[in-house]
Amino acid sequence: EVQLLESGGGLVQPGGSLRLSCAASGFTFSTYAMSWVRQPPGKGLECVADISASGGTTYYADSVKGRFTIFRDNSKNTLYLQLNSLRAEDTALYYCARDSPDGYHKDYWGQGTLVTVSS
Amino acid sequence: SYELTQPPSVSVSPGQTATITCSGDKLGDKYASWYQQRPGQSPVLVIYEDYKRPSGIPERFSGSNSGNTATLIISGTQTMDEADYYCQAWDSRPADVVFGGGTTLTVL
């Protein structure tokens, strides 16, 4: 059974940093691209970062480019998202999602971890 | 940037057919997917590559995509289908994954 378990969320002040983790199990982690998708309270979904299976290629939404970094440790079956220079508008539930083999959709999602940016 | 437009809400009576649309420029040239998100839960993939159903998704869920519109159809809608539904399109790069704004389906 595919499982994605996010952690690392919390309350942080504007300008602060946070690192999110996503522990994957139930599949061969190193063969799948992965994504972070966020959802502000009461709002829709936004894919903020994606990383290839090897970790060699990354993509970012314009809204987070230069502030967030996605990376992975395939030896630990773990995906990460480093959040720097946080803003109030980054407040959201952050989901880890597995990309389908062809990359066209997200076939499994975690339960999410909440990031709140507030003074 | 590419945009997908969904109606904010759709209402349907139990047992009837619910139709949720998703519009975007030449959307029919791209693959469309649909996700169901029940209150307080994570999104679940219900349709991918326009019309395919993942294992475990009931046959009452179907999809189509042509021209500028992708459509999610739920036949014989049940109260358990009450949820937010998001369409998603894939463009040239993974980071160009785009979600629609979501549609709240009410079954009453």
Image (spheres, coloured by chain):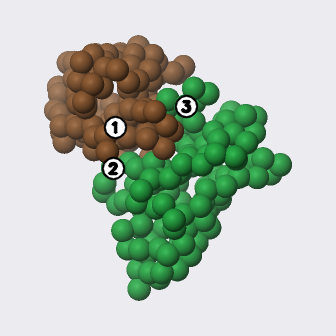
> Chain A drawn in what color?
green
**In front of the other: A66 or B72:** A66
In this rendering, the count of numbered labels is 3
- Residue A25, x across and y down, in percent: 73, 42
Mark 1 Cα shell of 10 Å, populated few (<14), some (14-19), many (≥20): many
Q: Is residue A20 left or right of residue B24?
A: right
Q: Is residue B71 above or below residue A65?
A: above
Q: Which mark is residue A44?
A: 2
Which amino acid type is marked by label 1? Tyr
Residue closer to the observer: B34 or A81: A81
Q: Are marks 1 and 2 in contact (CB under 8 Å)?
A: yes
Q: Amino acid at mark 3?
A: Gly
Q: Residue at x 27, y 16 (%)?
A: B66
Residue at 19 percent across and 42 percent down: it is B8
Q: Camera-side residue: A41 or B94?
A: B94
Mark whose residue sits in front, 2 or 3: 3
Q: Is residue A71 visible?
A: yes
Q: What chain does badge 2 belong to?
A: A
Query: Label 2 sits on what residue type?
Result: Gly
Residue at horizontal 58 percent and vertical 72 percent from the top: A18
Left or right, residue A112 beside residue A52: left
Q: Chain of mark 3?
A: A
Q: Position of residue A66 (x, y in %)?
A: 51, 65
Q: State the hue of chain B.
A: brown
Residue A103 image label = 3
The C terminus of chain B - image quarter: top left
Residue assigned mark 1: B86
